[in-house]
Image (cartoon, rainbow, N blue to C red):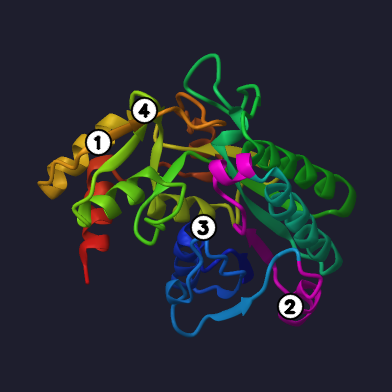
Amino acid sequence: MRIIVTGGAGFIGSHLVDAYCDAGHEVLVIDSLWEHGGGRRANVRGGISLVHMDVRDEAIARVFADFKPDIVNHHAAQHSVAISVRDPLYDAGVNVLGLLNVLEQAAKNDVGKVIFASSGAIFGTPERLPITEATPQRPTSPYGISKMVGEHYLRFYRATRGVDFTALRYGNVYGPRQDPNGEAGVIAIFIGHFLSGEGVRIDSDGEQTRDYVYVADVAAANLAALERGPGGAFVIGTGRRTSVNQIYRMLVAVSGFDAPVQHAPPRPGDARDAEFDSALAHAELGWSPATPLAEGIRQTYEYFRRP
C-alpha cells in the first residue's frame, strides 16, 4: 500500500512508519517539525521521503495528488494538554482544522481509509474504570475536546464522502524517541532528569494514575488498522493503572539514582485516573499489548542513556 503518515517524524509516528516500511508498504511522511511537537528529521529512516509541511497548509493538496495514497495515517497533532489549556485556539487550529484539511484531500483523492490518532483524553475523568468504548466522553481539556471533535468529523466524512476510518484512542504512550524536554510524557521527562542528575517535579500527590502503553505495541495497533476496524474507534491500553509515584520508583530501580522530588499543584485539564479495557481492539483488530511496563521502561531508559 501507499501510505501518507502525517506527524511521521514524531515520537509515535516514526515508530509506525518503521512498522509500515518493515511490512513492505511505501510511505511518505508529512511533518511540520514543530519544536514543541517532537518531530525530528533524525527519526525518519533513510530512504523515506519527508515533506516539511504543516497539515493546515493548502499546499498539502499537491502532495496528495502527486503521491496518490491508499491510506492516510493522521498522527500530526498538538498533543500537549498543558499547551492546549494555555492556547486553545492553537490547539483547535492544528487538531481540528489540520484534520479537516487532511480529510478534504483524502476525499478528493479517493483515499480508502484514514487512521486517526485519538486519545483517552476524550473521556476526561470517568465515573468508573476501566474505560471502554462505551464510557461517556467528558473531556476536561481543549486537547481532549479537539480529539473528540475529530472523531465526529471522521464519522461525517465516512457518511457523506466515503472516506473510511479507524480511530485509536491511546492511553499514555511511552518509549524511545519521546521528547524528554516536552510537556507531555512523564516517563521520558523523568528519564531526562534522572540522566542529568536532576530532581523531578511531581504534580499533586503523585497518586494520579495512567495506563501506560509501549510505543511498539501502539505501532502494532496501527499496522492492524490497515486492514481491520472499519468505522470503528478503539481504546488502546494495557488494562493496568500505574501512579506517577510508581513510575518514579521504577526509574529509581532502573537507574540507581534517588532523584530529589519537588511537588507542584495539579495541572489544569489533567484527569485524575485512567485505565483502559481493550477487549474490543483484541476482538476486532486482533491487537493486545505485548510489553510489560517494567520492560518498556528499561528499554526506554537504555535508549536515552546511549550516547
Nearer mark to the viewer, of 4 and 1 = 1
Query: Counting residues from the N terminus, which is met first, the one under dot 3 or under dot 1?
Result: 3
- Image coordinates for residue 30, horizontal then vertical, percent: 63, 71
Query: Counting residues from the N terminus, which is met first, the one under dot 1 or under dot 2?
Result: 2
Crowd tier of the residue under label 2, counting other residues whose Cα lies within 10 Å: few below 14, some 14–19, many 20 or above = some
Between 175 and 287, the residue placed more toward the observer is: 175
Residue at point 21%, 56% (across, down): 195
Among all residues in the image, which is located at the extreme bottom?
A: 47
Query: Counting residues from the N terminus, which is met first, the one under dot 2 or under dot 3?
Result: 2
Query: Counting residues from the N terminus, which is met first, the one under dot 4 or under dot 3?
Result: 3
- Image coordinates for residue 187, horizontal then vertical, percent: 33, 46
Residue at point 51%, 15% (across, down): 128
Nearer mark to the viewer, of 4 and 3 = 4
Q: Which residues are magenta?
A: 57-86
Mark 4 → mark 3, Cα distance in angstroms: 25 Å
Query: Counting residues from the N terminus, which is met first, the one under dot 4 or under dot 1?
Result: 4
Crowd tier of the residue under label 1, counting other residues whose Cα lies within 10 Å: few below 14, some 14–19, many 20 or above = few
Nearer mark to the viewer, of 3 and 1 = 1
Q: Which residue is the site of mark 3?
A: 223
> Regarding mark 4 in the picture, which secondary structure is present there?
loop
Viewport quadrant of the N terminus: bottom right
Q: Please tell me whether residue 243 is drawn above or below residue 201 in the rendered image.
A: above
Crowd tier of the residue under label 3, counting other residues whose Cα lies within 10 Å: few below 14, some 14–19, many 20 or above = some
Residue at point 40%, 50% (across, down): 217
> Regarding mark 3 in the picture, which secondary structure is present there?
helix
Q: Which residue is the site of mark 4?
A: 241
Mark 1 → mark 2, Cα distance in angstroms: 47 Å
Which quadrant of the structure image shows residue 302?
Answer: bottom left
Query: Counting residues from the N terminus, which is met first, the one under dot 2 or under dot 4?
Result: 2
> Regarding mark 2 in the picture, which secondary structure is present there?
helix
Mark 2 → mark 3, Cα distance in angstroms: 23 Å
